[in-house]
Image (cartoon, coloured by chain):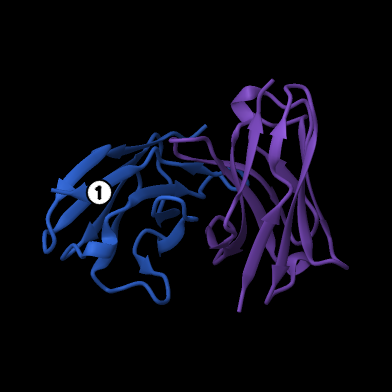
Chain colours: A purple, B blue
Amino acid sequence: EVQLVESGGGLIQPGGSLRLSCAASGFTVSSNYMSWVRQAPGKGLEWVSVIYSGGSTYYADSVKGRFTISRDNSKNTLYLQMNSLRAEDTAVYYCASANYYDSSGILFDYWGQGTLVTVSS
Amino acid sequence: DIQMTQSPSSLSASVGDRVTITCRASQSISSYLNWYQQKPGKAPKLLIYAASSLQSGVPSRFSGSGSGTDFTLTISSLQPEDFATYYCQQSYSTPIFTFGPGTKVDIK
């Protein structure tokens, strides 16, 4: 059974840093595309970042230069390092496996339960 | 950047109703359109991918159609467990993805 479990969220002051983790089971993180999607309180879904199986990484403009996606193959875990945090980064952060059926056909089929990040002084 | 819009933003319906939600892209995205359902406090769930393909395990009362810029999600007979928020998502501009703003379906 595929399972994704996020951790690492919490209350952080503006300008601070936080690292989120997403432990996977039932499949191999390094063999899949993996993504982070966030949802601000009462708002819609916003794609944040993706890491391809080959290691290429991509980011939404809103987090580019501040967030870094990575993975630890030995721990089968996905990470999101978040630096220079702002109030507008406050959200539930979900990790998701991003499977594909062709070069542009990418879908998010398995999701974690989410971890809340609150950026406030 | 490709922008996604959804209409309506919310709707009220009764059990047994046929419900249609529309998603529009700011440019053609071929059929690279997925639909998700999200219930309060829960993670999104994939319903439809490639505009019209039903994800495994999803009830057949859900269907999707469209291509280019205009897409629809239809629930043929609304069930109590279908009251949720629905999001479309495009992957045409891979590796950049965009979600629609969502459509909340609640009980009339």
Snapshot quadrant of residue A28: bottom right
User: Which is more toward the observer, A109 or A86?
Assistant: A86
Image spot of residue B6 (x, y percent): 31, 39
Residue at 59% from the left image edge and 52% from the top image edge: A114
Residue at 65% from the left image edge and 64% from the top image edge: A4
Label 1 sits on a secondary structure element that is strand
Q: Quadrant of the C terminus of chain A?
A: top right
Graded by Cα atoms within 10 Å as few (under 14), some (14 to 19) or many (20 or more), the crowding at tag 1 reads many
User: Residue beneath label 1, please?
Assistant: B105
Instruction: Specify whether residue B48 is in view.
Output: yes
Establish if B23 lies above or below A63. below
Give me the chain letter of mark 1: B
The count of marks equals: 1
Residue at 55% from the left image edge and 44% from the top image edge: B97
Name the kind of residue labelled 1 in the image: Val
Q: Quadrant of the N terminus of chain A?
A: bottom right
Image spot of residue B4 (x, y percent): 40, 37
Snapshot quadrant of residue A98: bottom right
Q: Residue furthest right?
A: A74
Image spot of residue B77 (x, y percent): 15, 65
Residue B26 vs residue A60: left or right?
left
Image spot of residue A93 (x, y percent): 61, 45
Snapshot quadrant of residue A60: top right
User: Which is more toward the observer, A86 or B36?
Assistant: A86
Instruction: Specify whether residue A61 is in view.
Output: no
